[in-house]
Image (cartoon, grey):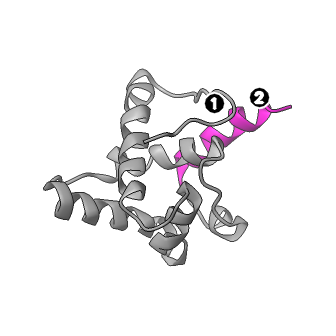
Amino acid sequence: MDTSTQHRPPRFAGTGTLQKNLPVARQRVLAWLQAQPGATWQERWTSTGAENLPKEGWLDLPRQWFTRAQGLVLRDSQLAPGLPMLICGNVIRPTSAWLLSRTSQHLGRAMAPARESES
C-alpha cells in the first residue's frame, strides 16, 4: 500500500502517547480505506459515505469493518487521530461542509501546524 505524498507528512503536536499512536491510527484508517471501492484514496473515502453521517459517525464505518474483517473491537481513540493526518497530508480531501461540521479535537490541533508549515 503506497501512502507516499509529494512531501514529508506534517508533524503533529501532542503528548508522547498521542505521537506514538498517530501512525497506528493512520494505518488503521488506511487499511479500512484500502478495502473500499475506488482507484485512489479520495475515491475510496468518497465511496464510504462517511461524509453523509452526523458528527463523528464516520468512526462507525471503520470500527464495523475491523470487527467483521479482523475480529478487532476498536475504540474511537484508536481510529480518530489517524484521519487528520490523512487530511493534512492531502491524502484525502473531505468537503468543506464536512470539515466545518466536525467537533474533533484532533483535526483542529493537526491542521494548524500542518498549514503553517506550508507558508
Query: Label 1: which residue?
Result: 10
In screen coordinates, is 40 left or right of 32? right
Q: Quadrant of residue 41?
A: bottom right
In screen coordinates, is 117 left or right of 28? right
- Could you tell me which secondary element the residue under label 1 belongs to? loop
Residue at the spot 34% in from the left edge and 66% down from the top edge: 60
For the record, the magenta segment spans: 104-119
Residue at the spot 43% in from the left edge and 34% down from the top edge: 22
Res. 117 mark = 2
Q: Earlier in the sequence, mark 1 or mark 2?
A: 1
The amino acid type, in three-letter code, at marker 1 is Pro
Mark pair 1, 2: CA separation? 8 Å
Q: Main secondary structure of the magenta part?
A: helix
Q: Residues within 10 Å of mark 1 (few under 14, many from 20)?
A: some
- Give x and y (percent) for residue 76: 34, 53
Residue at the spot 64% in from the left edge and 43% down from the top edge: 88
